[in-house]
Amino acid sequence: MAPQILLFLATLFLSSHAQSDVVVNPIRQLRPLSGAGGHHIKGVSCLSWRLAVETNNLQGWKLVPQSCERYVGHYMLGDQYRLDCETVADAAIEYAKTVKPAADGKDVWVFDIDETTLSNLPYYARSDVQFGAIAYNDTKFNEWVAEGQAPAVPAIRKLYLKVQSLGFKTVFLSGTAEKFTDVRITNLHETGYDKWEKLILKGEDQHGKTAVQYKSDKRGDLVKKGYRIVGNVGDQWSDLIGTNVGSRTFKVPDPMYYIA
Amino acid sequence: MAPQILLFLATLFLSSHAQSDVVVNPIRQLRPLSGAGGHHIKGVSCLSWRLAVETNNLQGWKLVPQSCERYVGHYMLGDQYRLDCETVADAAIEYAKTVKPAADGKDVWVFDIDETTLSNLPYYARSDVQFGAIAYNDTKFNEWVAEGQAPAVPAIRKLYLKVQSLGFKTVFLSGTAEKFTDVRITNLHETGYDKWEKLILKGEDQHGKTAVQYKSDKRGDLVKKGYRIVGNVGDQWSDLIGTNVGSRTFKVPDPMYYIA
């Protein structure tokens, strides 16, 4: 092995700090930027944690790590979350344009609701919730849902309206309890979700099923009724795995909670 | 809706710039940080692009966008890629510790090779490759593979050694052509991968199969031989989807190329 290659590998792999000033030809020269110049950026481990969450490498986690609460808060309240949602929507729209819906009206896109079409961020940003760094409280969360004041996630509303305009039907499939049906319908209507083929909420008979089982079963029912699931959009991997997941799935970012 | 909630929603959802100074109670106060204070950070769209790649929202892409070449370069040469790989390995190790291998020695972990156990970064960092922003050149890449000088990805080597020490067997499953068998064995040995149950490279008879088909078939062969795939580690989603994917899959970061 040539000495300069050894030097490069030593720099790159034996040290955790890549130093661009010792990188030699034929390595492409890069201007040093914050975070690539050999010094740590505060909060980077939270970035790795979020990536592990978004790729489903981390499963079954109960809480946002306390050391990442501020990081997750800034992410959710800042530009990056919105840009990430826009990128999801744009990728889904590009794909939707490649599919021609059949004349029978059976080509559907399945949308999850919470943190996908509607945002609970006003709730999660509360000081007694801390973006998921405080344990989930069913009573408090249900009180928030009952208010029916969740805003839309704008990028996903754009996707929803676009797939309808392309000739697809839309189905909402949510783990929200059926008792919230009326308030959810009003909430959806008031935030620009005007119509849907089906709105499926979780009935008492589905109790005891995991989200993966429940959503797989409901998608199976759709397929049995002749629907073809063209796209499937959700913030939880439990929306996107299991059976009858659809021809393409789209993961919307959510570093605040995990549903199995 | 209370006026202060309306104000909050207006701030958060009607504007793309969340301004922490108008956020009111009961919203948790956050110190403004770079990127969450209402101004754009250069390169954020590349961050969204990378997230879309890592979550498999973007499929079939041919090239790193030219505008993201420097971003991808800094990511791959800098700390963040190494931290992200460490987080993948740590999540996989935590999972591995929860599984007790049976006495029959049939519990295996499947590892991809390129950008998973071995790194082609010295090749991808070349000025005529530009981290995947220049079209893939089969001849050039094969010349690099034939050199047998790919370094290990240290975090994944740590995982590999750890699962062996926990009593699991390891299998390499790679799309590399079988003609590189000898050089790959030498390369693996020289970088600290000392033993394996099987090393599966792509034979002439597998030509014409996609990576998903080829890898599903080979994993199916393992299962037919009585192996149980406990974990499956790869940088491409084509390593991790299809059939017999294993009880848990782990996505290693790779924003440089896509294999269907």
Image: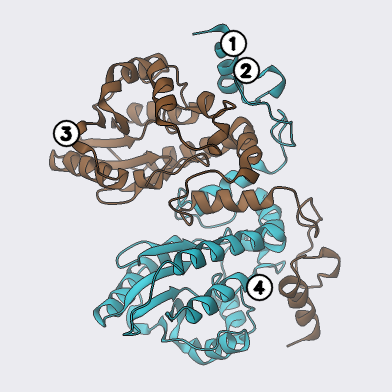
Chain colours: A cyan, B brown
Q: Amino acid at mark 3?
A: Asp
Q: Please determine if labels 1 and 3 lie on a single subunit.
A: no
Q: Nearer the viewer, mark 1 or mark 3?
A: 1
Say whether disc 2 or disc 1 marks the residue closer to the N-terminus.
Answer: 1
Work out how far the residue at label 3 is from the one at label 2, CA to CA, in angstroms. 50 Å
Determine the CA span between mark 2 and mark 1.
8 Å
- Label 4 neighbour load within 10 Å: few <14, some 14-19, many 20+: many
Residue B85 position (above or below residue A188): above
Q: Is residue B91 above or below residue A257?
A: above
Which residue reaches farthest right? Answer: B21
Q: Are marks 4 and 2 on the same chain?
A: yes
> Which residue corresponds to mark 1?
A4
Whichever of labels 4 and 2 marks the residue nearer the N terminus, that label is 2
Task: Tell me the element at label 4.
Answer: helix
Q: CA distance from mark 1 to mark 3?
A: 47 Å
> Can you identify the residue that label 2 sits on?
A25
Circle 4: residue type: Tyr
Chain holding disc 2 = A
Q: Quadrant of residue B161?
A: top left
Q: Residue at x 52, y 36 (%)?
A: B85
Indicate left or right for A1 with B200 as reference. right
Label pair 4/1, CB-CB below 8 angstroms: no
Rounded to the nearest whole Å, what is the CA distance between mark 4 and mark 1? 55 Å
The residue under label 3 is: B104
In space, the residues marked 4 and 2 are separated at their CA atoms by: 53 Å
Q: In this rendering, which labeled residue sits more in front, label 4 or label 2? A: 2
A96 or A72: nearer the viewer: A96
